[in-house]
Image: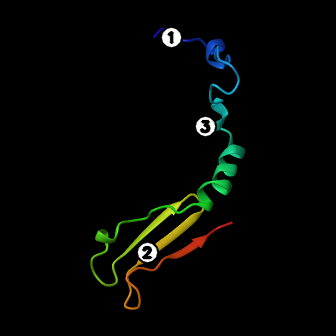
Amino acid sequence: MPAKNHKQWLADPPLQPGEWVDSRVYSDPRIFEDELKNIFRRTWIPVCHESELPNLYDFRTTASRSSYAAVPTTKCARFSTCARIAA
């Protein structure tokens, strides 16, 4: 594929509207915050598989942007989830 110059990179592709993804979805902070709010904070995100916590009091932690979670094994329940969500 031949190299593109700056003007070619900025030009819209020769496709109909809706047939391509605007490159702002990769770099616009407002779009990123909207995706966090409307997609990622509203869905379950797997942290680990039960086989990764075979012993009592084993735990796993994870972070995703402004959300933090810990998954410990306890005496009362095989798994419990402790999450701190920063707004």
Measured as percent of width and height from the top left, residue 4 is found at: 55, 12
Q: CA distance from mark 1 to mark 2?
A: 48 Å
The residue singled out by tag 2 in the image is: 71
Quadrant in the picture for residue 17 = top right
The residue carrying mark 1 is: 3
Q: Secondary structure at mark 3?
A: helix
x and y, in percent, of residue 82 in the image: 51, 77
Q: Point out the frontmost of discs 1 and 2.
A: 2
The circle on residue 19 is: none
Q: Is residue 59 left or right of residue 30?
A: left
Q: Of tags 3 and 1, which is closer to the observer? A: 3
Q: Is residue 59 left or right of residue 63?
A: left
Identify residue for label 3. 26
Circle nearer the N terminus (3, 1): 1
Find out whether the residues at labels 3 and 1 contact each other: C-beta distance under 8 Å: no
Q: Residue at x 43, y 69 (%)?
A: 61
Using the rendered view, name the quadrant where residue 15 is placed. Answer: top right
Q: Residue at x 67, y 56 (%)?
A: 37
Please report whichever mark, 1 or 2, sits nearer to the chain's N-terminal start. Answer: 1
